[in-house]
Amino acid sequence: MVPKSSASMLFEPLTIRGFTAPNRVMVSPMQQYSSDGDGTANDFHLVQLGRFALGGAGMVIAEATAIEPAGRMSHTDLGIWSDDHIAPLTRIAAFIEAQGAIPGIQLVHAGRKGSMQAPWDGMGPLTDADAARGEAPWPTIGPSALSPGGGWPVPHEMSEAEIAANIALWADAACRAAAAGFRIIDLHGAHGYLLHAFLSPLSNRRTDRYGGSLVNRMRYPLEVVRAIRAAIPQGCALFYRLSVLDGIDGGWTVEDSVAFCTELVAEGVDVIDCSSGGAISDRSSNTRVRRGFAFHAPYSRAIKQDVSGALVATVGLIVEPEQAEAVLQAGDADIIAIGREMLSDPNWTHRARSALLGESYDAWPREAGWWLDKRVGALRQLRDGGETPMTRYQRGSH
Ligand SMILES: Cc1cc2nc3c(=O)[nH]c(=O)nc-3n(C[C@H](O)[C@H](O)[C@H](O)COP(=O)(O)O)c2cc1C
């Protein structure tokens, strides 16, 4: 095959700590709301994540996985608060790695945005009606006793002792993730969940050393990072998914993010994964950054330019190979995270390789690639002969 181009940044390997990802494509963490109810991963998660690895992605990050039961968003989120969770996750990490991809997992505490219905049950706060069908609401926690939005419960304001105990849960969860074989631990510090809730002045109104000034609001997430970095093996990479801005007056800003990320890098975070928004749950107010194609690229670019030592990922409506390549070529990011487009086409990475480097099935699993490679010539012969898949039916000759 004649390559379209001799080089593509998207398909340049990327070395981070103890591993080298074969390309810059990362499957963005996506909750599936499909655990067995006690946070345990099952065959659905194996197949769902496994097909992204078979599809050629360089890094596959498992969904937001709760560090304690109250840190889930919904009843059917994945969890990693018990050693019993490790074995099924080990199977998933091992499968991903066996396909040549780097396995990662996102850790989360939902904080005041927990106790939520699954999307197909309404995605609102859990109610008595949900309790009647076995999904009771639970008390939530946060930096301050402020509801995230209309109808959502008011969280319990965490004491300093509760903050210290919570930090230990993060470190324990990270150790379990490393024990399960995940090479990337991605902290969910975005979308209004507990880490983000401490950063944003919209959710943090504390007057102690965990609230008020920027330095104080950064204290809890930085303590979490420090505890995790001290607990996990050196070869394990730490990614931090950040809402770079709240997009609401009086909220967290890009300038705040630059200051925070500088501290994150000093604490041993390897990649800043740039997202935005989610500080409050009220969708009727103007809380959203405009969602155009590659809508976080300006923010990942700002972090890349202003924070030295950070590798940067960007996410959000990156759907075409040429677009992903252009984001990297422009210096807007080092890693391309893709969510929904992967749900649409788990083989997106293989398709991108063909689009950017010329048609080849070399990187596909041989169980598919061997056959598809042979088929190229046969298809070309038919098309060169003037035949299309519809010819027979257009002639009406069947
Ligand atoms: C089904 C679904 C579940 C998601 N779950 C998570 C999650 O667990 N953690 C997270 O950080 N983002 C989550 N997101 C956000 C995605 O990771 C991604 O940032 C977002 O969908 C924008 O990227 P996209 O346009 O490529 O889909 C989820 C998105 C979807 C569609």
Image (tube, helix red, strand yellow):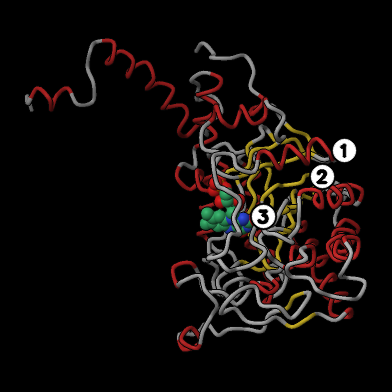
Q: Which mark is residue 247?
A: 3
The image shows a total of numbered marks equal to 3
Q: Whole-Å distance between the Cαs marked 2 and 3?
A: 25 Å
Specify which label sits upstream in the sequence, 2 or 3.
3
Q: Is residue 270 left or right of residue 365?
A: right
Q: Which residue is mark 1?
A: 308
Which amino acid is tagged 3? Gly
Seen from the viewer's position, the closer of residues 118 and 193 is: 193
Residue 198: x %, y % from top left: 79, 67
| Residue 313, placed above or below residue 395 | below
Q: Whole-Å distance between the Cαs marked 2 and 1?
A: 11 Å
Q: Is residue 178 left or right of residue 147?
A: right
Q: Mark 1 and mark 2 in contact (Cβ < 8 Å)?
A: no
Q: Mark 3 and mark 2 in contact (Cβ < 8 Å)?
A: no
| Residue 383, placed above or below residue 103 | above
Residue 12: x %, y % from top left: 69, 26
Seen from the viewer's position, the closer of residues 47 and 273 is: 273
Q: Which residue is mark 2?
A: 270
Q: Quadrant of residue 9?
A: top right
Which amino acid is tagged 2? Asp
Q: Is mark 1 within 8 Å of ligand 1?
A: no
